[in-house]
Image (tube, rainbow, N blue to C red):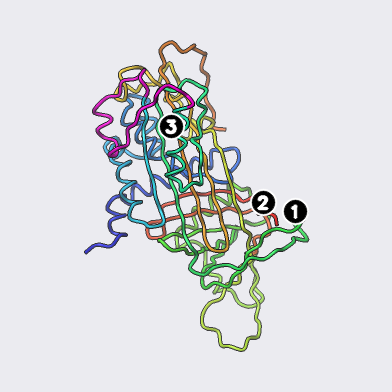
Amino acid sequence: MGTSEDTFQRALTAADIDAANGLTRHWLAARAEIPSAASGLGIWPLLAVLATGAVEDTRDELLAAARIDADRAAAVPAALLAALRESPALSAAVAVWAGKRVTLDPDWTAGLPVDAVGSLTGDPAADKAALDDWASRNTRGLIPEMPLDFGQPIDLVLASALAVKTTWRTPFTDLRRTFRTGPWAGLGQVRGLTAVLGDVLRVADDASVLTVAGDGDIDVLLALGRDGLDPHAVVDTLLDAADPAWGRSATELTPGERAIGVEVAEYRSMRPQAGPETAVDTVRFRLDADLDLSADAAALGLVLASDQDRARFDRLAAEPVYVSQAKQACTAVFSATGFEAAAVTAMAMARAAGVPKFDHTHVQARIVFDRPFAYLARHRPTGLVLVAGWVAEPETA
């Protein structure tokens, strides 16, 4: 009998995981600033859904951004939902709502996950309430609203929801602390966390990376970069560090040696040492981000899809449509007992006919943790990156 891990890996192939993680890396690298919380995995199935309804250059651009071919694009949404159902710590949903001004292609809707298609009434208040309820239900209440402007014309909505919740194998202890030096020195008391863990720290020249193991096959990784290292470089290093072969274990350091944010020392105890020890001082954080993905059109393959004159979704709807809004709301919470995060990604589409035309130009994609650091959450057996972001400041007391 196969395990849940086997089922997960049958649903999502190693190539799928590389594709989704590649999108996350490329997207974050293309942004002017690293978001406090973001999920490339939340965007990935929507690009696949759009690609199955697109033709010609519009389809090719979406497939290139999603890093999959046309055949795999048709299978990705259902495969992702099937895979995440195998983890008790994860949940996901994909849905489409159509208004009366568009006629969806039945072949396109047949390729969507079961029960994924709903209707828009045309009443902005009623539609907002219904879609807000969907967002809340599918993120365990962490994202209470669909991140769209319902004051704008909307004829079609595509959305994904992702939620992760894990409890630490070894909990932290809450404490109040004050930083005397560094960028957090002026914050006053902050909500700190401390714990003694095992062989969970790896070090390299540019960063030290701590892995905090949770239940449900979830790890959360925290990366502290060397002084002056750009946040983009820290995040890129953190994504590399998801590979267990990255760097070297801090257990290889001898007393008196140092690494980034790390010092190795000896101390006296009444009991013999039972195994590797890593003393961790970090901080609690709760981060919320509202991202306008239209600023990332080039990185996400949405340049043509969001151009009302050039978008080609002939296999999606009978009427010409284009992506008029693309947004994501993401929340991440790191506490003494565990980690919880959620993301809702939404793309609104509008009929191109009758919309005023504009001249379009080129779109440009614009272990003492005592200072800003990067984090990500991943599915431990496969390495699939779920959420990632940058902690600029901790929670204050």
Quadrant location, the N terminus: bottom left
Q: Mark 1 points at which residue?
A: 187
- 323 relative to 393, above or below: above
Q: Determine the CA span between mark 3 and mark 1.
A: 40 Å
In the figure, 194 relative to 238: above or below?
below
Which callout, 1 or 2, points at the residue further toward the start of the chain? 1
Q: Is residue 118 magenta?
A: yes
- For badge 3, the amino acid type reads Gly
Where, quadrant-wise, is the C terminus in this rendering?
bottom right
Q: Is residue 322 left or right of residue 283?
A: left
Q: What stretch is highlighted in magenta?
A: 99-125
Left or right of residue 191, residue 233 in this image: left
Instruction: Name above or below for residue 347 compared with residue 90.
Output: above
Disc number placed over residue 393 in the picture, else none: 2
Question: Which of the marked residues, 3 or 1, is nearer the chain's N terminus?
Answer: 1
Residue 91, horizontal then vertical, whole percent:
39, 50
Total marks placed:
3
Query: Badge 3 is on which residue?
Result: 301
Tell me, for residue 369, which label it has, or none: none
Q: Where is residue 219 in the image (x, y as percent from the top left)?
A: 47, 60
The amino acid type of the residue labelled 2 equals Glu
